[in-house]
Amino acid sequence: MTTASRPTALITGASRGIGRAIAVALAPTHDLLLTARDANALAEVAVSATALGASCRSIVLDLRDAAAISSTLDGLAPDVLVNNAGLAVMKPFLSLTPDEWHSQVDVNINALFHVTRAVLPAMVARGSGHVITIGSLAGRNTFVGGSCYAGTKHFVMGFTESLMLEVRDAGVKVSVVMPGSVDTDLFPEGTDRSWMLEPADVAEVVAHMIATPAHALQGRVEVRPLSPKRPRL
């Protein structure tokens, strides 16, 4: 998938929020493979990214479907993988339904295996590549209602740092970005989001990670709002 001048980035959950912002941030330098479940929303992101110079391919994909991931991503060899897709249902443990539990585990944990497993062999064979996973500060914190969500983000930390140690000698980078509160529809209606990070703030961190020298690895970055008492300027 790589050309001499434009590497390729595969972004999951690219139809909205942080994923959309990452697509826009990388469009000036990368061609894009954009995945999500909403074809119309993906098409809108592709229009914005194309206007910034990217060649885009939209891939409608439900990351809860392991077989679909394997068949759809077979043969793709992106230079960069951004595991961005995530699902959050924040409820006390005894209020979570089995479907809510399994959906979060399927998207936040199992999809990391299936998507990364599909494209990592080509990176190792090529001797270069970068896998970036969007985690959360919930990956080292806990809170009421986070028994599943925070648990999945703790998994992200163990997954990414273990994988980094496995493939760095092959020339492949593995990184995790851990945002604090981000102004997305993750939060219920009526929540004051004026102080939170914007998706573009997280996207800028991802773009910076990718742009580091080939011999340098930024393995983990935490990014948080300056203060919940100070609205964004």
Image: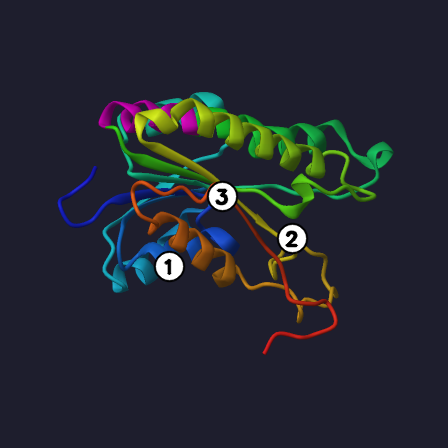
Q: Magenta part of the protein: which range?
A: 116-126
Q: Is residue 4 found left or right of 105 in the rendered image? A: left
Residue shown at 72% from the left, 57% from the top: 188
- Whether pointer 1 and pointer 3 mark residues with C-beta atoms closer than 8 Å, the reply is no
The residue lying toward the viewer, choosing from 37 and 9, is: 9
Residue 59 picture location, percent across and down: 36, 40
Q: Where residue 83 appears, x then y in whole percent?
A: 46, 39
* Nearer-N-terminus badge (2/3): 3
Q: Nearer the viewer, mark 1 or mark 2?
A: 1
Check if residue 85 falls in the magenta segment: no
Percent position of residue 216, x then y: 36, 43
Quadrant for the C terminus in the image:
bottom right
What distance separates the C-alpha of mark 1 from that of mark 3? 14 Å
The reply to whether dot 1 and dot 2 touch (C-beta < 8 Å) is no
Q: Tell me if I can see residue 111 in this picture.
A: no
Q: Amino acid at mark 2?
A: Leu
**Image height of 72 relative to 194, above or below:** above
Amino acid beneath label 1: Ala
**x and y percentages locating residue 37 in the rendered image:** 47, 41
Instruction: Give the residue number, with chain letter if any, for mark 2.
Output: 186
Task: Give the Cα separation between the discs numbered 2 and 3.
Answer: 14 Å
Give the SS element for disc 3. loop
- The answer to which quarter of the image holds residue 204 is bottom left
Q: Is residue 55 above or below residue 79?
A: below
Instruction: Give the position of the N terminus as an image quadrant.
Output: top left
Q: Write down the residue under mark 1.
A: 25
Write down the residue under mark 3. Answer: 84
> Magenta region's main secondary structure?
helix
The tag earlier along the polypeptide, 1 or 3, is 1
Mark 1 burial class by Cα count in 10 Å: few <14, some 14-19, many 20+: many
Q: Amino acid at mark 3?
A: Asn
* 109 sits to left or right of 216: right
